[in-house]
Amino acid sequence: MMALLVITASFLQLLIGLGYVLIVAPFLVLYDPNFVSVSIAGLFSGIMGTLAGLGGPPVAILYQNEKGSVIRGTLSGFSILGTVLSLLFLGVAGRFDLNDLKLFSYMLPGIVAGFYLSKYAIGMVDKGYIRKAMLGVSFLAAIMVIIKALKL
């Protein structure tokens, strides 16, 4: 815990991004979601989501071989609960304010458009592309965190 007080946020983001890059590649094999693995994925999702805004990949990687409907439902549940808890804890710590809500409001049109357009992509995603899409998005998100941490 003391190490978190000594290292910079950029270095922590770099470690998280590199960790995801290293984690995504080996997860090309089948993993079974069970109580222990889901609990561990939830733990890492909460930590990584709060620290780097990258909470989805641990759960996405775990559920990569499930049906599209199971993946969508599970990731949605994790995202909603994880976001509420992260915002609650960030608020208690004084790290969430009205400016953050303002920034969120800028994303609302994209969120609404994405929700509307998603009904056209569901058929494609459910035809076997979801695993590659999730791993690809997880990998790209990790690269973006690394770039942000390195300030490139």
Image (tube, grey):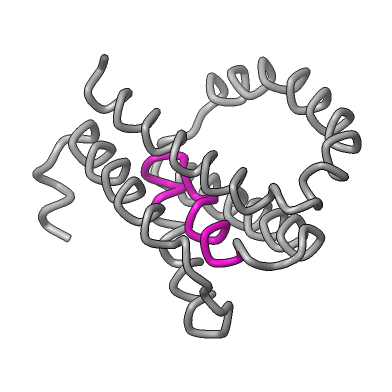
x and y percentages locating residue 44 in the rendered image: 41, 61
Taking depth in this image into account, of 11 and 134 the one nearest to the observer is 134
Say whether residue 29 is left or right of residue 101.
Answer: left
Q: Nearer the viewer, residue 131 or 7?
A: 131
Q: Quadrant of residue 112?
A: top right
Residue ID at (16%, 35%): 8
Q: Is residue 124 left or right of residue 91?
A: right
Vertical arrangement, residue 122 with respect to residue 143, above or below = below
Viewer-proximal residue, 38 or 129? Answer: 129
Task: Report the residue at 69% width, 20% height from top.
Answer: 105
- The N terminus, quarter of image: bottom left
Answer above or below: position of 97 versus 89. Answer: above
The secondary structure that dominates the magenta segment is: helix
Q: Is residue 105 left or right of residue 20?
A: right
Is 134 in the magenta?
no
Magenta-highlighted residues: 48-63
Q: Which residue is pictured at 67% across the width and 21% down the height?
A: 107
Q: Residue lying farthest bottom?
A: 35
Residue 121 vs 111, above or below: the answer is below
Q: How many marks?
A: 0
What residue is at 39 percent from the left and 40 percent from the top? 52
Which quadrant of the figure contains the C terminus? top left
Question: Residue 122 in the image: x percent, y percent?
Answer: 84, 44
Which percent across, then down, holds residue 18? 26, 43
Residue 53 on the magenta segment: yes
In the rendered view, would you say 53 is above or below 104?
below
Q: Where is residue 100 drawn, in percent x and y?
A: 54, 25
